[in-house]
Image: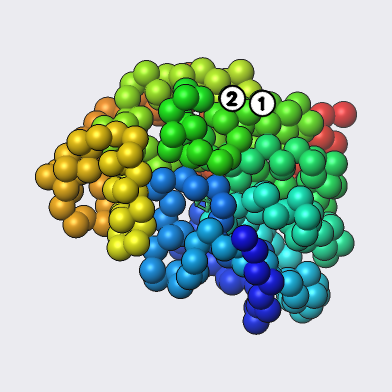
């Protein structure tokens, strides 16, 4: 189900102190999402999205974006995908993400895209062009090494193996790409085996970074949706969460400390970035300069 809405503005400035994946601005072209991830934070009441499965398409987004990009005094990196997947199924019809990349190339802005869909590969040539004049980096959210488990907790997105394939295709095409390893759900995928599998597949896919959160945040409507799904797919687990976390917003895995240490060690051995300050620095690198300096 879809609905066209009018947006008032698109780019929101990100404070330097909150810098996350190099973003200078945050942008969402869609509201709501059809991907059905059981842990989705964007269902929280504070975002006022309304009916979450009814995807709202910002019909005037490209016009607003063009005006906002033209009026900026300096360029920067635009983050996409924090509230709704920019490669959700409606992107095939409306192409707002694709057309916004064309505008970014024109005005020399860079982009960081978060997605769980291999539809991102449709725009690979465009991403290469944006990367030349600004910077284009893609973060695939991947939380499970196992396709079977990913289909339970992220039922309508590309499977984990399809996301790893997309990561490799991006890397093979010279686009820096990595993994958002989050959220990792207590008592479900917070295992050493899962971390080892993900790092193994990340190495095969030439991932530049893996950024983890070994836990999940839960509140209001989002918590209800999560618990309903736990009841369906993991009988008994809801009560375990209630006993362990009560009404806590941040529900960190009891194994978080050892899993951060394991991930850090495996990433260091494989030369994969895992600290946000290092990942932010990826955006500072001028690739053209890097390439020129080789000759
Ligand atoms: S892809 Fe992102 S926005 Fe969409 S349901 Fe999953 S977590 Fe939520």
Task: Give the percent coordinates (x, y) of residue 176.
Answer: 68, 37
Residue of label 1:
165
> Which element carries disc 1, helix, strand or loop?
helix
SS type, badge 2: helix
User: Residue 177 or 143: which is nearer the viewer?
Assistant: 143
In contact (CB < 8 Å): disc 2 and disc 1:
yes
Q: Residue at x 43, y 28 (%)?
A: 149
Q: Position of residue 210 (x, y in %)?
A: 50, 34
Residue 125, percent across and down? 85, 41
Q: How crowded is mark 1: few (under 14 residues within 10 Å), some or many (20 or more)?
A: some
In the picture, measured across the screen, residue 61 lies left or right of residue 195, that is: right
Q: Is residue 183 in view from this perspective?
A: yes
Residue visible at 65% across and 81% down in the picture: 8
Identify the residue at image location x=35%, y=30%. 189
Distance from disc 2 to disc 1, alpha carbons, whole Å, reads 6 Å
Query: Farthest left residue?
Result: 243
């Amino acid at each position: 189900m879809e609905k066209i809405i009018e947006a008032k503005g698109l780019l929101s400035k990100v404070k330097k102190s909150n810098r996350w994946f190099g973003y200078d601005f945050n942008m969402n072209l869609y509201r709501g999402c059809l991907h059905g991830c059981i842990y989705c934070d964007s269902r929280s009441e504070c975002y006022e999205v309304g009916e979450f499965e009814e995807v709202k398409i910002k019909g005037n987004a490209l016009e607003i974006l063009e005006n906002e990009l033209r009026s900026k005094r300096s360029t920067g990196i635009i983050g996409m995908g924090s509230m709704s997947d920019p490669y959700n199924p409606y992107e095939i019809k409306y192409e707002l993400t694709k057309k916004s990349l064309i505008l970014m190339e024109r005005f020399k802005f860079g982009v960081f895209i978060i997605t769980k869909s291999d539809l991102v590969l449709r725009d690979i040539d465009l991403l290469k062009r944006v990367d030349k004049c600004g910077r284009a980096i893609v973060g695939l959210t991947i939380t499970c090494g196992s396709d079977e488990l990913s289909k339970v907790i992220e039922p309508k997105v590309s499977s984990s193996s399809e996301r790893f394939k997309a990561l490799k295709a991006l890397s093979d095409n010279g686009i820096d790409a990595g993994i958002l390893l989050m959220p990792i759900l207590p008592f479900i995928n917070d295992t050493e085996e899962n971390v080892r599998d993900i790092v193994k597949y990340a190495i095969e896919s030439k991932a530049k970074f893996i950024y983890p959160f070994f836990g999940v945040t839960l509140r209001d409507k989002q918590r209800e949706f999560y618990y309903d799904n736990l009841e369906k797919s993991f009988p008994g687990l809801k009560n375990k969460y209630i006993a362990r976390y009560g009404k806590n917003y941040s529900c960190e895995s009891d194994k978080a400390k050892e899993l951060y240490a394991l991930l850090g060690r495996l990433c260091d051995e494989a030369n994969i970035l895992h600290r946000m300050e290092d990942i932010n620095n990826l955006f500072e690198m001028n690739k053209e300069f890097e390439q020129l300096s080789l000759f």
